[in-house]
């Protein structure tokens, strides 16, 4: 905020001095701050910008005025019904069990640069809510951004679980998943991918799942890991085909640099 003070000089000349008062971020209204961030990211996304305020209102219905543990995955059903995915379902890319610094960043840089695959964060809701934290409080109309994930369930976790379920249900054709081949269990049976995405891949809509196993050095052996055999068997039971390809991180980085949509 600012205030103006007039200072007389020599009795005739007046100089306007603007005094700027900086408001500590801790004193800002968290509801207004959250809504501004939501709308800014929504408007930046290349879809219908005229629906952003309506999308925010539907989103807030899921958690505002409710205690954290009362907000479950189903609380977001209306939001996903009103905000359907629009990317080609056959270009869905899942990812899991990946080192946040090393590979998750690579997944998103790859999809953004090449435009040939779409992760959850490349969809409208995923893009808008990535990096944000939110929750409500029973009897309050506010949105809070602190101490939101210290209980289970909570609005944040419930949203991302439902988003994972919905994107898996939406997928079709040849679905791709990027896994970290340097892990002992690239397919971890307690991950969101294992517990919420794989069970919701729909056959016959999904023909097969292609695992892109990110490795440091290609040796054609990491695709034989026991956890991946388990994944193959699960998919077989769902009548969904399975394939595994080892791709070095260096090769993916080269594809990003050159903007190659076909990388493997």
Image: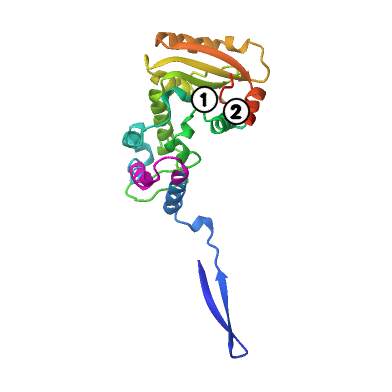
Percent x, y of residue 172: 41, 20
- Dominant SS of magenta comes to helix
Residue 153 visible at all: no
- Quick check: marks 2 and 1 in contact, CB under 8 Å? yes
Label 1 neighbourhood size at 10 Å, few (<14), some (14-19), many (20+)? many
Q: Is residue 249 left or right of residue 237?
A: right
Tell me which residue sits at (51%, 21%) in the image. 177
Q: Residue at x 47, y 44 (%)?
A: 44
According to the image, label 2 marks what residue?
103
Q: Pick the residue in front: 227 or 43.
A: 43
200 relative to 224, above or below: below
Viewport quadrant of the C terminus: top right
* Residue pictured at 58% horizontal, 12% vertical: 223
Tag 1 secondary structure: strand
The location of residue 207, given as percent across then percent down, is 42, 14
Magenta span? 42-59
Quick one: which residue is furthest to the bottom in this view? 11
Q: Is residue 206 magenta?
A: no
In the displayed structure image, the side of residue 219 where residue 100 appears, left or right: left
Numbered disc total: 2
Q: Give neighbour class at mark 2: few <14, some 14-19, many 20+ (Cα, 10 Å).
A: some
Rounded to the nearest angstrom, the CA distance separating label 2 from label 1 is 9 Å
What residue appears at the point 43 percent right and 48 percent down from the top-left corner? Answer: 39
């Amino acid at each position: 905020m600012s205030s103006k003070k007039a200072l007389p000089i020599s009795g005739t000349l007046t100089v306007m001095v603007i005094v700027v008062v900086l408001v500590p971020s801790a004193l800002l209204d968290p509801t207004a701050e959250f809504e501004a961030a939501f709308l800014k990211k929504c408007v930046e996304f290349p879809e219908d910008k005229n629906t952003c305020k309506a999308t925010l209102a539907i989103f807030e219905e899921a958690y505002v005025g409710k205690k954290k543990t009362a907000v479950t995955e189903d609380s977001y059903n209306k939001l996903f019904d009103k905000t359907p995915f629009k990317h080609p379902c056959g270009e869905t890319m899942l990812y899991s069990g990946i080192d946040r610094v090393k590979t998750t960043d690579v997944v998103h840089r790859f999809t953004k640069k090449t435009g040939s695959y779409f992760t959850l964060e490349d969809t409208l809701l995923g893009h808008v809510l990535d990096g944000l934290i939110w929750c409500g409080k029973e009897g309050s109309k506010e949105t809070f951004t602190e101490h939101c994930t210290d209980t289970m369930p909570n609005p944040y976790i419930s949203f991302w679980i439902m988003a994972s379920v919905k994107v898996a249900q939406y997928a079709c054709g040849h679905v791709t998943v990027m896994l970290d081949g340097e892990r002992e269990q690239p397919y971890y049976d307690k991950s969101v991918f294992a517990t919420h995405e794989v069970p919701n891949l729909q056959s016959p809509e999904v023909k097969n799942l292609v695992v892109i196993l990110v490795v440091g050095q290609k040796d054609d052996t990491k695709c034989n890991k026991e956890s991946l055999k388990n994944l193959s068997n699960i998919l077989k039971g769902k009548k969904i085909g399975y394939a595994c390809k080892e791709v070095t991180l260096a090769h993916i980085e080269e594809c990003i640099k050159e903007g190659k949509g076909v990388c493997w």
